[in-house]
DNA sequence: TATTAGTCAATAAA
DNA sequence: TTTATTGACTAATA
């Protein structure tokens, strides 16, 4: 049976061959599979090896980092020891010396960080020691009201008399300071702030391009004297390092504490009090710069924040307010000149003004029934029924607006994003300001001092070379906001005329007093300055550098080949022209800045002045929705983009015509 | 930390 | 006398 079955299913030779062939194929497939797996394995092994290598590398790096940190920790281990020693010293001297390095406890309270550190004995003791040393050096009482210049002169005299110090190698000194700062891991900002009383930028410049001692003025020598003292004083070095260590990560750059007395106290510790006295005369200027620098951005930020808030609340109550305020009592006084004074206006008032004026502006711009220029012109020409104007504006602005037209605001500026994207047409504003000033014979000086709080030269620069709104910093925008508000003020001319008269009287008075005082002015003993009849002396100011046309040509040629010259090139140019390196580097900074400025203003001025289509400048749309240039966008791109945007957002035909021409021109140029 | 933005005072030009 | 220019400075920024 089995045999029969076997016989029946027994394969033929052909079948066998087929089976063999199949087996062979299987074997081949398996071989391929094995090869593939082997290859895969190899890849995995390679990847693993790479990964392991990477991890090993990372491990090595981490180990190095740990070592560095351990070394750093090690180097700072003496902190507690020094602290303890100084505490002991303080206890020893405490009974005899009650002089505090701080002017008042409130000074300390203003900076908790500084307070923690500075209140530790090490600082106080160092400060006391130095203050004591000072007293032996300073000529005259530290509390005397002698001017900085006389103190400086006495200091210089001391330094000169000391012989070996009269000729500093400023380059070497700067190099040593650089190395020391690097070694101590102290930044230029901290060093400048606490040791020299200078800004970081100035420190950078001094260290990078130290002037020869012989070419330095008394004032210019002061930082080098301080640097020398710093390098030779272990206490100062240690203290500064401690400060830097503590401040790192806590100190907020660019924002000076509201009360800088704590910083000043530390600087007093690090410097000598005699040098600190030298700053007294600069306090006015310093505080002015302080005010400019600190309050301005902060104020504008506040303004914008408050504006945002006010806009939101006002929008909510807009409808009811229009009726409620209509019968409000009259508050505006004709002689309220205080509102013109930039410093006299509270941020809230300023914000309120911005909101009112901008809303008004938006209404005008979007209302085709109102000529875009009519309102501004009516402000500029009091002859256009001044009584009626005065009467209208004697009410609040809001009353006026509600009386004249309903508050319809097609562009909803009350949203925060739109508020932030607020854009003023700076070119139009400056054009209108210039016209108004010219028509009313008001000088830039009076306008600058009363409206913007700037000098005549700054006003001239602002009006002649306005930057586009988008290119302005917060501080820069403030001026244009003020100008914009001033343009809206119906009393602006009267107010400025009164100020002009007052100013003329004051100048006349000063001139009379001045001529009287001049008779008292005599050259001081050293011939370095003038002393008045009351014994106050001024150091003769450094004469202004006037570059000759040849020097300027050389610099321009250098700029064209290398707009950002290396320190070597600057040195070479300075040597070639016989100028100070700082003069050359300043020239390059200023030239770049002014090239940029002219790049901004020239196309716009062309647009304004070469507009044959309209007799008026482009004052119609002072407020736009800002379009920020995106990353990588060129100035021209941004300019074109904004121009194109204006086409759709501004409903003034003449403007569109001019802008179309301008866009086409620019397209051709591109 | 190098560079920029904003500003000033001195000076030139109008 | 007013306006424009420019070298120099500080604070802010990249």
Image: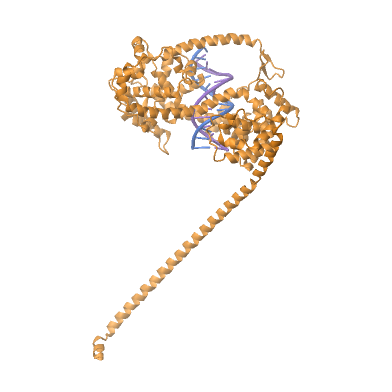
Chain colours: A orange, B purple, C blue
Give percent across and percent down for residue A237: 66, 38
Give percent across and percent down for residue A286: 57, 25
Q: Is residue A114 above or below residue A399?
A: below
Q: Is residue A69 visible?
A: yes
Q: Is residue A503 found left or right of A140 in the rendered image?
A: left
Give percent across and percent down for residue A80: 65, 44
Q: Is residue A597 visible?
A: no
Residue A599 versus residue A308: which sits nearer the camera? A308
Residue A429 versus residue A288: which sits nearer the camera? A288
Q: Is residue A363 above or below residue A635?
A: above
Picture quarter containing residue A627? top left
Picture quarter containing residue A207? top right
Give percent across and percent down for residue A600: 44, 28
Q: Quadrant of the N terminus of chain A?
A: bottom left
Q: Residue at x 29, y 17 (%)?
A: A404
Q: Quadrant of the C terminus of chain A?
A: top left
């Amino acid at each position: 049976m089995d045999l029969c079955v076997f016989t029946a299913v027994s394969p033929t030779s052909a079948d066998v061959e087929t089976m063999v062939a199949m087996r062979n194929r299987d074997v081949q497939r398996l071989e391929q599979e094995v090869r593939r797996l082997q290859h895969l394995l190899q890849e995995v092994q390679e990847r693993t090896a790479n990964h392991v290598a990477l991890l090993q590398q990372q491990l090595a790096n981490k180990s190095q980092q740990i070592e560095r940190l351990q070394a750093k920790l090690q180097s700072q281990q003496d902190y507690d020891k020094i602290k303890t020693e100084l505490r002991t010293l303080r206890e020893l001297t405490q009974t005899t010396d009650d002089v505090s390095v701080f002017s008042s406890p409130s000074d300390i309270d203003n900076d908790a960080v500084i307070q923690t550190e500075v209140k530790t004995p090490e600082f106080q003791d160092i400060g006391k020691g130095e203050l004591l040393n000072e007293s032996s050096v300073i000529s005259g009482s530290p509390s005397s009201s002698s001017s900085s210049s006389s103190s400086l002169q006495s200091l210089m005299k001391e330094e000169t008399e000391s012989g070996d110090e009269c000729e500093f190698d400023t380059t070497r000194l700067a190099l040593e300071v650089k190395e020391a700062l690097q070694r101590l891991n102290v930044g230029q900002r901290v060093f400048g702030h606490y040791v020299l009383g200078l800004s970081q930028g100035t420190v950078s410049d001094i260290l990078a391009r130290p002037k020869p001692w012989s070419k330095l003025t008394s004032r210019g020598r002061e930082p080098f004297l301080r640097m020398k003292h710093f390098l030779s004083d272990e206490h100062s070095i240690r203290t500064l390092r401690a400060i830097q260590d503590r401040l790192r990560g806590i100190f907020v750059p660019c924002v000076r504490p509201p009360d800088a007395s704590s910083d000043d106290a530390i600087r007093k510790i690090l410097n000598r009090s005699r040098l600190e006295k030298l700053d007294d005369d600069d306090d006015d200027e310093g505080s002015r710069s302080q005010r400019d620098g600190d309050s301005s951005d902060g104020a504008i930020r506040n303004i914008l924040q408050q504006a945002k808030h006010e806009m939101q609340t006002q929008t909510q109550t807009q409808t009811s307010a229009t009726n409620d305020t209509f019968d409000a009592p009259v508050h505006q006084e004709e002689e309220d000149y205080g509102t013109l004074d930039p410093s006299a206006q509270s941020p809230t008032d300023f914000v309120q003004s911005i909101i009112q004026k901008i809303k008004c502006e938006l209404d005008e711009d979007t209302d085709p029934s109102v000529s875009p220029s009519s309102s501004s012109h009516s402000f500029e020409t009091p002859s256009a029924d001044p009584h009626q104007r005065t009467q209208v504006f004697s009410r609040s602005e809001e009353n006026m607006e509600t009386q004249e037209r309903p508050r319809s605001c097609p562009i909803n500026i009350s949203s925060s994003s739109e508020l932030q994207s607020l854009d003023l047409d700076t070119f139009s504003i400056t054009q209108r300001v210039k016209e108004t000033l010219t028509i009313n014979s008001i000088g830039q000086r009076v306008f600058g001092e009363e409206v913007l709080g700037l000098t005549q030269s700054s006003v001239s620069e602002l009006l002649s070379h306005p930057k586009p709104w988008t290119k302005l910093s917060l501080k820069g925008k403030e001026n244009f906001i003020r100008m914009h508000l001033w343009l809206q003020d119906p009393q602006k001319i009267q107010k400025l005329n009164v100020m002009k008269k007052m100013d003329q009287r004051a100048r006349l008075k000063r001139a009379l007093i001045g001529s009287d005082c001049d008779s008292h002015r005599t050259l001081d003993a050293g011939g370095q300055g003038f002393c008045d009849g009351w014994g106050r002396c001024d150091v003769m100011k450094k004469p202004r550098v006037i570059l000759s046309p040849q020097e300027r040509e050389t610099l321009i040629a250098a700029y064209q080949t290398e707009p950002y010259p290396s320190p070597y090139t600057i040195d070479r140019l300075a040597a070639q022209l016989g100028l100070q390196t700082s003069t050359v580097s300043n020239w390059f900074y200023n030239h770049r800045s002014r090239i940029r400025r002219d790049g901004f203003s020239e196309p716009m001025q062309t647009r304004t002045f070469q507009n044959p289509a309209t007799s008026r400048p482009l004052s119609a749309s002072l407020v736009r929705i800002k379009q920020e240039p995106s990353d990588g966008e060129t100035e021209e791109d941004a300019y074109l983009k904004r121009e194109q945007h204006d086409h759709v957002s501004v409903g003034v035909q003449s403007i569109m015509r001019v802008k179309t021409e301008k866009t086409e021109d620019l397209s051709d140029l591109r």
